[in-house]
Image (cartoon, rainbow, N blue to C red):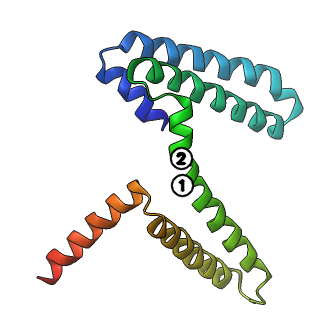
Amino acid sequence: MRLINLNVLLAQGRSDLFFRLEVIKKVLIVIVLAVTWRWGIQAIIAGQIVVSMVAYYLNTFYDGRILGYGLGPQVRDLLRYLGAAGAMGAGAFALTWLPVAQPGVLLFIQVVVGGLIYGLLCLGFRLPVFMDGWHVLQGKIALRSA
């Protein structure tokens, strides 16, 4: 989403805002690194997560003003995909209790089952982006079989 939000600014001819946002975000990254480095990698990662959330808010703020598609609508659109991803992660994690001797086999099972869970949930709820990809895939399959 970050790149989409920034590309909207460029498409609207607002490279000034794009530049300002990038400078602000880079300064935030440097400040957070300067503050968190002495507490180790976990503090640095936590700081970068905070910077990412602030950066996302900044990116969506201008999109909200320019297009009327700000943080709230974007998060609402993403929640269904995040829900499907959460269910996929929970399902794949639950498989860790299978009595499988080889870690590689377990990983393969988790990837396949996780992909099936995500795909079926997206298909079942008819999530728009997934459905677009699904229709493209069906078109390619139909062309090859014809």
Which residue position holds label 2?
Answer: 78
Among the 4 quarters of the image, the one containing residue 99: bottom right
Image x and y of residue 143, in percent = 14, 75
Give the numbered dot on residue 81: 1
The C terminus - image quarter: bottom left
- Residue 49, by quadrant, is top right
Report if the CB atoms under discs 2 and 1 are less than 8 Å apart.
Answer: yes
Q: Nearer the viewer, residue 76 or 28?
A: 76
Residue drawn at (44%, 34%), measured in percent from left and top? 3
Q: How many marks?
A: 2
When asked about the image quadrant of residue 24, the answer is top right
- Foreground of the two, 76 or 108: 76
- What amino acid does circle 1 point to? Tyr
Q: Does residue 19 appear to the left or right of 55 in the view shown? A: left
Q: Residue at x 85, y 36 (%)?
A: 40
Q: Residue at x 40, y 9 (%)?
A: 16
Q: Amino acid at mark 2?
A: Leu
Vertical order, 20 against 61 (above or below): above
